[in-house]
Image (cartoon, rainbow, N blue to C red):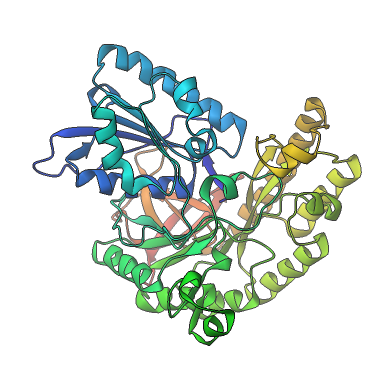
Amino acid sequence: MEKIIDENTQGNTLTLEAREGNSRKLYIESYGCQMNFSDSEIVASILAEQGYNTTNLLEDADLVLVNTCSIRDKAEQTVRKRLEKYNAVKRINPKMKVGVLGCMAERLKEKFLEEEKIVDLVVGPDAYKDIPNLLKEVEEGRDAVNVILSKEETYGDISPVRLGGNGITAFVSITRGCDNMCTFCVVPFTRGRERSRDPQSILEEVNDLAEKGYKEITLLGQNVDSYLWYGGGLKKDFKNASEMQQATATNFSNLLALVAEAQPKMRIRFSTSNPQDMTEDVLHTMAKYNNICNYIHLPVQSGSTRILKEMNRQHTREEYFALIDKVREILPDCGISQDMITGFPTETEEDHQDTLSLMEYVKYDFGFMFMYSERPGTLAARKLVDDVPEEIKKRRLTEIVNLQQKHSAYHTNRTVGKTVEVLIERESKKSDQHWSGRTPQNTVAVFPKENYKPGDFVLVKINDCTTATLLGEAVGYSNNH
């Protein structure tokens, strides 16, 4: 999962409706990508069965869990600072137990117990079902660690509780792990090999969300386009390749159609896509169903073919252009966003200019842009020298960000005067007199409340904009849902 939600601020705290009879309190905080937030919902569901209700007050907690990200050093440092805060509370409440979940736990393993003396349990992304057993270990005075990666675990049999947020949008995990082995990325080492979830369990979860009133779901995976489920089960269940080929296979395009048809009144999104794995049939499926949002998060990381090869990205600059051309042809009003890394080892000024020219060609709606951060254990860290000076990285990042802001403004300005569909998600952060929601292209729109409510699909006439936000007025309900 390359798209990052936020690694700079306090993590998202999961707060759920209390279950009657549960007496213990769980404080769970999530950092990093969307998959981590989805995983926290799974953990909360497992612990609800063990007598835990969630709390948003750290001081009240019997158990504190932090779901971590390892994709950049800054993300890990943010978690370490939070552990210092937990330690201060634990001195007041010594019975409080602290656990580290997710990618950082997987990367550091037992070392975490030595480095952070307050940590009682360390749990990798594939071991959440073992948390009840690990808590028993802790209660008996032993440190508890399970960071075993699985080739089968998808948590498809667990119904996640949902973030205590808007009750309107939800993540549905369809794959776990990644096989791409980009040289800069820790995900294959922290989340293991790629595996897909049974489509029937995905449909059941989507249908359940619809019954509960959710209006939009995001199909989630490190690389959704490589989703593949064979009718007979997992790859390991087949005796040979021939037997596997004869089984009915569901690919991502098929799954997308199944979900869109199952709930035609729900909006469907997906993330993250990988350029070398996105196929034309996915684009045609998006075009066929009105409830699939015209938006693709399509990380490129660099505009230089040479750097892409160093990153092991499996596509060239020209192949990426060809994919963009195909998207524009089949889905003319599709929003596209990017991930970009600047200052990758050996990156020259010419490579950097290639990135800027690629951005000019695509004109992304928005993006997630970062300086290269060497991650221990990755191929880049083992084989390449981090040789681009910090001041050059910063200057290049500034140029990339400034160009992206120009392109974002280009897209929002083009929308002024048009009427767009917006799903109301919450109050505007800046005004309690305005609603905030997103267009199918994933652009935020803000407009006066009037008589509408969260969960409504509303047609909004856009009168003004900022670089990132559309400003308008509601003109009626949408008939598409």
Q: Is residue 67 above or below residue 436?
A: above
- Residue lying at the far left in this picture: please name it: 21
As displayed, is residue 58 above or below residue 397?
A: above
Along the viewing direction, whichever of 71 and 339 lies nearer the viewer? 71
Q: Quadrant of residue 55?
A: top left
Q: Name the outermost residue toward the front.
A: 239
Q: Residue furthest bottom?
A: 246
Find residue 232 and report its horizontal and vertical position in percent.
43, 79
Q: What count of labels does the image hold?
A: 0
Residue 348 placed where, x, y %?
A: 89, 40
**Is residue 303 in sight in this rendering?**
no
In the rendered image, is residue 145 in sight? yes
The quarter of the displayed image where residue 245 is located:
bottom right
The C terminus is located in which quarter? Answer: bottom left
- 225 horizontally vs 110: left or right: right
Write the residue at 54% across / 78% down: 285
Please state if 183 lies on the left or on the right of 412 as rendered.
right
Residue lying at 50% horizontally and 66% vertically, measured from the top left: 293
Provide residue 340's location: percent of width, then percent of height: 70, 46
The spot of residue 431 in percent (x, y) is: 39, 38
Q: Residue at x 16, y 40 (%)?
A: 51
**Observer-nearest of 426 and 29:** 29
Task: Say whether residue 295 is left or right of residue 360.
Answer: left
Q: Residue at x 29, y 66 (%)?
A: 210
